[in-house]
Image (cartoon, helix red, strand yellow):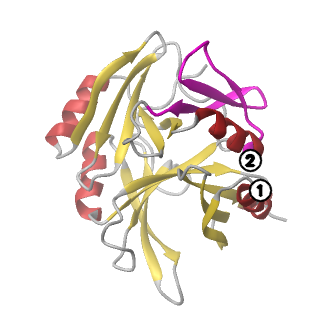
Amino acid sequence: MAAFAQSAPCWVDVQLSDLEAGKRFYGGLFGWTFHAGDGMPFADAYSEGELVAGLAAKKDGRMPTTWGVYFATDDIRATVARARKAGGRVITDPVRAQRAGVLAQLADPGGAVFGLWQAGERAGFEKANAPGAFCWTEVHTRQPERVDAFYEEVLGFRGTDIELPGDGATAEPFRIWSPAGTEPGEDTAIGGRAVITDAFPEMLPSYFLSYFAVADCDRTVDTAARLGGRITTPPVDIPYGRMAVLQDDQGAAFAVLQPTELLP
């Protein structure tokens, strides 16, 4: 498996109260199949035989039911040290996941949680930017200036500010991220940063939202509702395709995107 570029998104997983229910939901939604070690509280998800994500049973019921994203690093301890120095919080110090690799979990200065992954035998997902697989991630924050500086320092991101259509005539500020060593812009972007405005309740925390590509956004949304999921943002056209924000039947939030090239 090819290695991921430094700081590129390389893995996503979801923490669930009911692992078997999660397999039924995502199997029905994306057509995923699963493989789990005997008696192990997690399952690898596959799309057309290629690894795309992980489902894990929560060890503690107080843990959030949420999708997490991991960024590749070739020196996880150095990256964690930079994050701590830049004002981030270390939730889980680097820990070895057997021979697969080493992981850590951090929170940025705004409180959004993300992971780091230093590859061993597993580089990350085997399929991306195709229907049934991860295609994008973005952090939603109330502290864009602090958060922008944090990710630039810790992961080497370089930002390009754009405006996305908002409600009515109001444009929403948005920053897309390109990894270090590339020319910043839409052609190299691997993620982004959105601003949580005063239109949202103060209790809404900062968070990462990860997207999965689909062949038909509207059909996927209908399927999610039939499987017991919730529609947070109904299908809407954006400059990059047609997207919607959903919650699975246990409350984990994610988005789906039908890329422009797949629109009729």
- Quadrant position of the N terminus in the picture: top right
Left or right, 164 with reference to 158: right
Relative to 112, does residue 246 appear above or below in the rendering?
Answer: below
Question: Residue, x 42% and y 43% (percent of image)?
Answer: 179
In this rendering, the answer to whether 86 lies above or below 199 is: above
Which residue is drawn at the image coordinates 39% and 34% (left, top)? 60
State the residue in front, 189 or 183.
189
Separation of disc 1 and disc 2 at Cα?
6 Å
Labelled pair 1, 2 in contact (Cβ < 8 Å)? yes
Q: Amino acid at mark 1?
A: Thr
Left of 36 or right of it: where is 208?
Answer: left
Which stretch appears magenta? 29-58
Query: Residue 42: within the magenta?
Result: yes
- Tell me where residue 3 appears, x and y as whole percent: 52, 23
Secondary structure under the numbered disc 1 in the rendered image: helix
* Quarter of image, res 245: bottom right
Q: Which mark identifies residue 5?
A: none
Circle 2 residue: 29
Which residue is at the far bottom?
169
Q: Secondary structure at mark 2?
A: helix
Q: Position of residue 70 (x, y in %)?
A: 44, 36
Q: Would residue 53 be seen by someone viewing this image from the given angle?
A: no
Q: Is residue 171 above or below residue 70?
A: below
Amino acid type, mark 2: Leu
Q: Nearer the viewer, residue 145 or 211?
A: 211
In the image, is residue 218 part of the stretch drawn in magenta? no
**Dot 2 alpha-carbon crowd within 10 angstroms: few under 14, some 14 to 19, many 20 or more:** many
Q: Position of residue 17 (x, y in %)?
A: 51, 39
In terms of sequence position, does the residue under pointer 1 or pointer 2 come before the other? Answer: 2
Quadrant of the rendered image containing residue 194 = bottom left
The picture places residue 214, in percent across and down from the top left corner, at 73, 52
Residue at which label 1 appears = 223
